[in-house]
Image (cartoon, grey):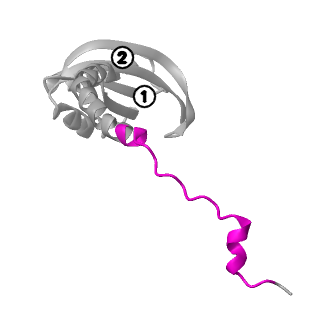
Amino acid sequence: MNKYELAVAINGKLDESEKNEAFDKVKALIERFGGQITAVDDWGKRRYAYEVHKTKEGYYSFIKFQAEPEVPVEIEQRIRIMDFVHRYLIVSDEKELTVKHEEAEAPKAEEKSAEDAAPAAAEEAPKAPEPEEAPADAEAGAPEEA
């Protein structure tokens, strides 16, 4: 199971009970497709950067969950048609990916150092001497100005 985070902005014109009901529907949607909610971070009512659906404020919430890779697509399809949801975004949890990525990078770093050694050895090779400039007398073959 992969880790994901869902950011949701819900209509700010809803009262407290309607807002809670809307968030419960979103949580139920995650659980319906086999997702397991691990954390919920409710930010409350915030002002939008720009007007959305003729509304200047919305309720923000961030829901972390674990699910199979196909679940976020199913959630997005269903959440897209919910009237009370103004904006949403599902992303993979970066912390988990970073750890796996760093573990995968360790062997590649050793391989890369061997590749870097070849160009470094070429740079250390002696350079061919550059041709010296011809002395002024050598230009005697050129016609003299009268």
The residue most toward the right is: 146
Residue 64 quadrant: top left
For mark 1, give the secondary structure.
strand
- Measure the C-alpha gap from mark 1 to mark 2: 13 Å
Looking at the picture, does residue 67 appear above or below residue 77? above
The answer, for residue 52, to whether it is visible in the render is yes
Q: Specify the segment rendered in magenta.
A: 121-144
Three-letter code for the amino acid on which mark 1 is drawn: Ala
Farthest-out residue, bottom: 146
Q: Toward the viewer: 106 or 83?
A: 106
Residue 27, magenta (yes or no)? no
> Which percent across, then down, holds residue 103?
23, 21
The x, y position of residue 3, in whole percent, is 24, 22
Q: Earlier in the sequence, mark 1 or mark 2?
A: 1
- Residue 71 disc label: none
Structural crowding at the residue carrying mark 2, measured as other residues with C-alpha within 10 Å and reported as few (<14), some (14–19) or many (≥20): few
Q: In the rendered view, would you say 106 is above or below 71?
A: above
Residue 62: image location, x then y, percent: 37, 20
Q: Which residue is mark 1?
A: 9
| Residue to which mark 2 is pinned | 20
Q: Residue at x 42, y 41 (%)?
A: 123
Which residue does the image show at 74% across and 85% down from the upper left? 143
